[in-house]
Image (spheres, helix red, strand yellow):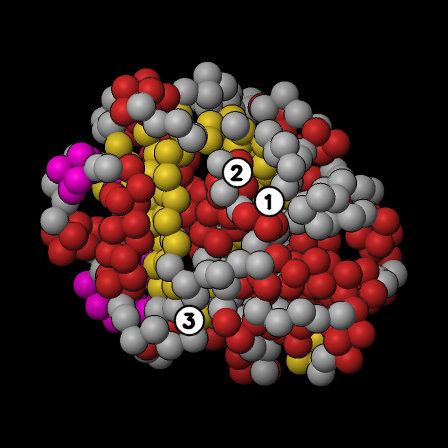
Amino acid sequence: MAATNFLSGKDIVIIAYGEVKNELRSGKTATELTADVMVQLLAKTGLTNRDIDGFALTLPLSELGFAWYSNVVVENLGIQARWLQITDIGGCAILGNVARAAAALKCGMIEMAFCIHADAPSRLPAVEYFNYRSEFQEPVGYQGPLVAFGLMTDAYDQKYGLKPEALGKLAVAQRNGAVANENALEKLRKPITVDDYLNSRPVSEPMRLLDCVMRCDGANGIVVTTLERAKAMGVKKMVRLASYSEITNYDPTNSTPDGFETGFQVVGPDALNKAGMAPRDVDMFHPYDDFLIALLLKLEQIGFCKRGEGSDFLMSTDMSPTGALPINTGGGQISAGQAGLAGGGTNVVEAVRQLMGEAGSRQVPNAKNALVTGIGVVPYFRNWGSSVAMVMET
C-alpha cells in the first residue's frame, strides 16, 4: 500500500534559506560552517536562538573521527532543542531532514526547525568504507563513485547509445548558472563550451573531467515551520512543501539487478502524483548532480522522456532559466561545488531561492513549483542506495 501524502495540506513552509560561499579550503570545521549558516538564517527571519526548538543535521564525513553528536552541536550553538535529527543517507539527507522536520511540526513536537548541511572535506581524516567496498571493489582498483559512474556511462552507451554532446550541453547550461552564482566555487565561475566539455580529459572512460563534481568546504540550510506560525510572524515570502517520497535499497532481493533500475522510477512519479502533477507541469528541475549521467537517468526514470531517449531530450530542451525546463540554475554541484562528499543542499537552496524570486540574473520567470531530488550512496553491483524527491510550490 502506497503511503499517503502527509504534506497534502501544504501547511508546512520554508521561510528562509542560507548559504556560505563554497571554498576549496575554508580553514573552518563543519560546526563553524553550521554556525555561519545559522547566523544568516537568524538575520533573515528575525529569530533568536530561543526560538529554535528543532534542529536537523546531516552527517559530515569530515567529522567522523570526532564527537559529531547533535546535542554537542546545539550546545555549541546555544540552542535549547525539543527535537534533534541527524540523517545519514548521503546526498538525500538534507531533503530527508526537511521531510522529517515537517513530520515533527505536524505532530506538534516543535514550532521552528533549522535544517543545515555542512562539511569541510579539506580537513577530512582517512575514512575506511567497510563491507562491499573494502571486500570486493578496492582490491581490484574499483575506486568508489568515479569508477561506478564511469562503468554506468559506458553501459548506458552500449545499451541505448549516448550522445556526448548532449551531456556537454547540460554541462554548459549548469556552468552558466554557476557564473551567475556568487556562492559558487570561484574556480568554477568561468564559462565553458560544448567543445571544452568534449575535449576535457578522460577520468573514468568514457566519463570526462567535466562530467564530475568537485568537492569543497561549504554549508547551506533552511528554516521550516508551519504556515500558521509563518503568517503570525508576518512572513511575506515562503515556499510550501507539496509532496515528498523516499526509498532506500531499491529491489534488495534481486541478486543480479539492472544498474539502470533505481529508486527514482518509484519516488519521482510518486512525488509528482502526490502533488497532482506530471513531468510536463514541472517549472524547474533541481536534481542532485554528482555526475552528469545521473541527471540523464533521472530525467528518464521520473518520466520527462522514455528510457534511452535522455540524449535526445537534452539536445532538444532549453535548460536555461528562460527555457522549457530550467535545470540546476545556480550551477548545481558539478559547477558550483559539492559541499562535502555528499551534499545536496546546493540544489535545495537554489530551488527555494528561485521560488522566492531572489535569483537575480538567473531568475526563472513566473516559477510556481520545483522538483528537487537527492542521491545517497553508490552500493556494489547496483545503482544508488537512496533516492528522494520533493515538490515545492509558491
Q: Secondary structure at mark 2?
A: loop
Amino acid type at image mark 2: Gly
Q: Examine the rendering and report whether any part of residue 338 can be seen.
A: yes
Q: Quadrant of the N terminus?
A: top right
Amino acid type at image mark 3: Glu
The answer to which image quadrant residue 33 occupies is bottom left
Q: Residue at x 45, y 43 (%)?
A: 95
Q: Secondary structure at mark 1?
A: loop
- Tell me the number on the disc at residue 166: none
Q: Which residue is mark 3?
A: 23
Q: Which residues are magenta?
A: 48-67
Q: 10 Å neighbourhood of mark 2: few (<14), some, or many (≥20)?
A: some
Q: Which residue is mark 2?
A: 357
Where's residue 11, x and y in %? 41, 20
Whether the magenta-drawn stretch holds residue 190 is answered as no
Q: Is residue 144 above or below residue 161?
A: below
Where's residue 237, x and y in %? 42, 30
Indicate left or right for 233 with 333 as reference. Answer: left
Q: Secondary structure at mark 3?
A: loop
Q: Earlier in the sequence, mark 1 or mark 2?
A: 2
- Tell me the number on the disc at residue 363: 1
Q: 10 Å neighbourhood of mark 1: few (<14), some, or many (≥20)?
A: many
Indicate left or right for 11 with 73 as reference. Answer: right
Where's residue 220, x and y in %? 38, 53
Amino acid type at image mark 1: Gln
* 308 and 284: which is toward the camera: 284
